[in-house]
Amino acid sequence: MKIRSFCLGLLAIVLVLGSLPLAAQDDQINMTMWVRAINFQTQELVDTWNANNDSQIELTVIPSAEFVTKMGAAIAAGEPPDIASIDLIYTPAFAAAGQLVDITDFVRELPYADDLTPAHMALGLYEGRNYAVPTAVDGSFMAFNVDLFEQAGLDPDNPPSTWDEVLEAARAVSALGDDIYGYWFSGACAGCNAFTFLPFIWASGGDVLSDDYATATIAEDPLVREALELYNTIWEEGLTPEGASIDNGSNFVSAFTGGNIGMAPLGNFALSLFQNDHPDLNFDIFHIPGKEGGAASFGGGDVIAIPAGTEHAEEAWRFIAWTLTDEPQIEIYAANGQIPVRLALVDNKYFEGDERQSIAASALAVGHTPYTTVYNDLFNDPNGPWLEMLQIAILDGDIDGAIELGQERFTQIMEG
């Protein structure tokens, strides 16, 4: 009788266990991760993790234009992803809204926390606490066509290091022929010109925002005016194609691949594209210079964070911490031409022999990113004040009017 009762009890246990999901039976943790469409090596990271860990991650790619809205809605509904790769410029707004998990204690345990790219770490801070770490980093720099430089009598081993030298080089290349131009910029792309124009000002010691990011300094900083004058000169002298004025970013990278552009400010994302899809393009890169020297870069790309409301914060951090270790940083990031987020790992076997990778990586050491919860309204909005100011100053030549408008509209947005 006792044996019969024991067998029935055992059968009941088996039936109950059989009715549970597999994850509950073996304590497997299933997590979700969201990434914007610009996802670098995220899929390979997730695949490698899944192949070597009991916990599993399902990756979902969200269109970039929809990411912020969908992320906020998911957190508000109590259905957040467990991990999120976020465009770093939006991190302060998410943190200020209480939508990210405080990971300060986790970050403090990292032996290489001080080696992570500074701009991304800065954007991951809110009120002195860490809410994100770098995951896919990019920096802006100047690409130049070596063949055109040589044809114009310029020394490709000594590229421009001041604004005057940039202008002189653009003039020399443009003088080669009617269909050759010294410079390219996408004149109707707000974000492109935050990424590539702001570094001219920063490298010179100026800025469009105060040190505490609380106020606009467009009208009071003379370097803002002088940078606008530099680009206006490039436009007025015809050193860039007329089509640049209406380009919304669709030719931001591809314009340089035609072989008739001397210089174009771009980012690390262009290196692998040029090397893989345009192997005959003879190009090199240099840092975006300041007026009298120096260098600066826009720290772009993504940070990785844990959205508020997840039930798997510790396991999510275990994945994040793993992505920062040597093997994925070298064998996934560097092996695919992506800059490691730990600057000490820039010297690796995959970057040996290509000085361009080292220059691109070193740009992140002088990288900077505006820290503001209204970044999108200020800099990214195609109808916002940044692009309108640039177009009025550069294309119309009304620099006074542009500065007045920029200062007024920046102030309205920042105080609103």
Image (cartoon, rainbow, N blue to C red):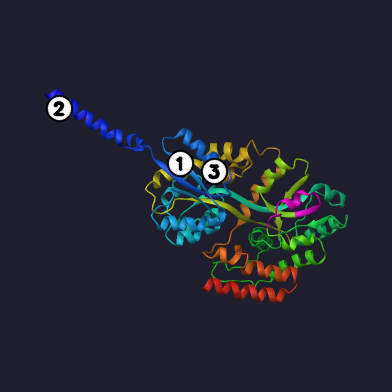
Residue 76, picture quadrant:
bottom left
Look at the numbered disc 1 and give the secondary structure of its residue.
Answer: strand
Within-10-Å neighbours for mark 2: few <14, some 14–19, many 20+? few
Q: Is 157 placed left or right of 123 in the picture?
A: right
Look at the numbered disc 2 and give the secondary structure of its residue.
Answer: helix
Residue found at the very far left of the displayed protein? 1
Q: Which residue lies at the image location 48% right of the left edge and 40% below the top edge?
A: 322
Q: CA distance from mark 3 to mark 1?
A: 11 Å
Dot 1 corresponds to which residue? 57
Q: CA distance from mark 2 to mark 1?
A: 42 Å
Q: Which residue lies at the image location 66% right of the left edge and 69% below the top edge?
A: 388
Q: Disc 3 or disc 2, which is closer to the eye? A: 2
Q: Is 374 placed left or right of 292 in the picture?
A: left
Tag count: 3
Magenta-drawn segment: 249-263
Residue type at the position of mark 2: Ser
Q: Which residue lies at the image location 75% right of the left edge and 72% below the top edge?
A: 397
Dot 3 corresponds to which residue? 42
Residue type at the position of mark 1: Ile
Q: Is residue 16 magenta?
A: no
Residue type at the position of mark 3: Thr
Answer whether residue 219 is visible to the viewer in this image. no
Q: Is 84 placed left or right of 29 in the picture?
A: right
Dot 2 corresponds to which residue? 5
Q: CA distance from mark 3 to mark 2?
A: 53 Å
Residue 119, picture quadrant:
bottom right
Give the image location of residue 109, x and y in percent.
44, 46
Of the 4 image quadrants, the one containing the N terminus is top left
Q: Is residue 250 magenta?
A: yes
Residue 358, picture quadrant:
top right
